[in-house]
Amino acid sequence: MSLKFGTDGVRGVANRELTPELALNLGRAAARVLGGRRWLIGRDTRVSGPLLGAALAAGLASEGAEVSDLGVLPTPGVAHVSALEQCGAAMISASHNPYKDNGIKLFAPGGRKLGDDVEERLEAELTALAVAGDPRPRPEGAEVGSISSDETGTARYLDHLTTKVLDGRRLDGMRVVVDAANGAASAVAAEAFGRLGAEVTVIHDNPDGRNINLDCGSTHPKSLQAAVVESGADVGLALDGDADRVLAVDATGALVDGDEIIGICAIDRKQRGLLVGDTVVVTVMSNLGFRHGMAAAGIAVVDTAVGDRYVLEEMTRGGFVLGGEQSGHVIFGDLASTGDGMLTGITLLDVMARSGRPLAELAASTMTRLPQVMVNVRTERRDPAVVESVADVVAAAEDRLGDSGRVLLRASGTEPLVRVMVEAPTDAEATEIANELAAAVRAAADG
């Protein structure tokens, strides 16, 4: 059995789909394909993290790599240390998934995510190792790699967040509640915001290996919304398990998603002359209201496929400095090599502090969200041709909506289903059109 890379590394049920044997082979494949003598490994708080991390480290070391175990550290922290040391790195995490799942994300030297071509080479090497075993000789003697602990990663990441991001500015007087999702940021969130002068309360910061993302974090923000209102805080920040994304909550308890966060930061940067090309990069899932808001502010929008790595690729290609996803992955290309939930939260609070405006007002002035309806249509097999077969139905729906709405159909890259998304002036119209399109997809799939 071998692993297939999704939009963000490999992922599966720990010890059943993502086994230590597979992690070991992935370590060997990574050392062969990506090269480099030095490697870093970090993880989130899942109970399976040390198991998979040890196997991955063993695979790397068996190919001659010197591996440093950073312990529990947010994904952007691992990427940051990778950038500082210009070496390969891996993060053991399944992001917002339940604790039984786990995953492995690989970074090229410099903290950069891998391109499709590199992942294809890794998959081929994994398959060769699984099928043919190990025909090549392994290092011996002094050439055998090593595994050691490195406890400096957290300090270096915190220094970056608290000394580089705001360039000397502070958040004195800002009251913030952070939901750490019982994940990788549990031990660092309070210190990061506290050092900058914010009055910070952290909730869901007691990980036990099994409660990561459990009724908390960016996928379950209700407890954070309640905590913000009850405490009279200015803002709430909901991280996910590996802290590479964040959603915000305003003082009224209303959710502020990635589109709104990106929009607020884009307008602020444009006003300060810091938005390269007056352009932001987002995925096709960003709300049409975001696009209207950016157009009104004189900001161009570049679309990519779903996945923050595609956003980053386009940002790099165009030299742009801001992009992200509706889900809360936000990338500041001049500050980090990947999405960073705490960095984004700090930046958002900085905009609030400098403008003197509450988050609700900033969000409302940035965009007006159009109702968005999503329907997942399960099919017997993964077949992108199903989407093409209903092109005439899609065209009719687009004609009906005109400039007032949007239709998007896409085949899932990991599951046998087609995702139908419709945005329209009203919930009722969006629901009606989405159901019509879903019925057409089902008929095409059955036929």
Image (spheres, helix red, strand yellow):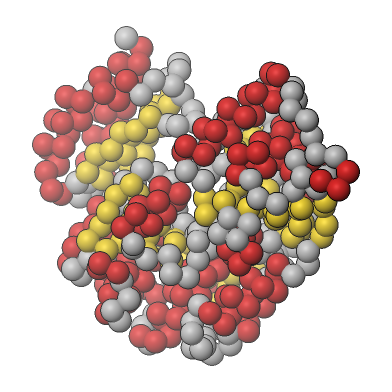
Residue at the spot x=82%, y=52% of the render? 147
The answer, for residue 322, to whether it is visible in the render is: yes
Residue at the spot x=35%, y=85% of the render? 355
Question: Residue 308 in the image: x percent, y percent?
Answer: 44, 51
Give the residue at the far top of this rendering.
Answer: 447
Q: Which quadrant is home to the C terminus?
A: top left
In this rendered view, identify the residue nearer to me: 156 or 221: 156
Question: Residue 296 in the image: x percent, y percent?
Answer: 17, 67
Q: Is residue 349 left or right of residue 266?
A: right
The answer, for residue 294, to whether it is visible in the render is: no
Residue at the spot x=50%, y=77% of the render? 165
Q: Is residue 232 left or right of residue 94?
A: left
Q: Quadrant of residue 80?
A: bottom right
Question: Residue 182 in the image: x percent, y percent?
Answer: 69, 58
Q: Is residue 21 left or right of residue 166?
A: right
Q: Which quadrant is home to the N terminus?
A: top right
In the rendered view, would you say 22 is above or below 302?
A: above
Question: Residue 105 in the image: x percent, y percent?
Answer: 60, 46
Residue at the spot x=51%, y=46% of the render? 114
Q: How many marks?
A: 0
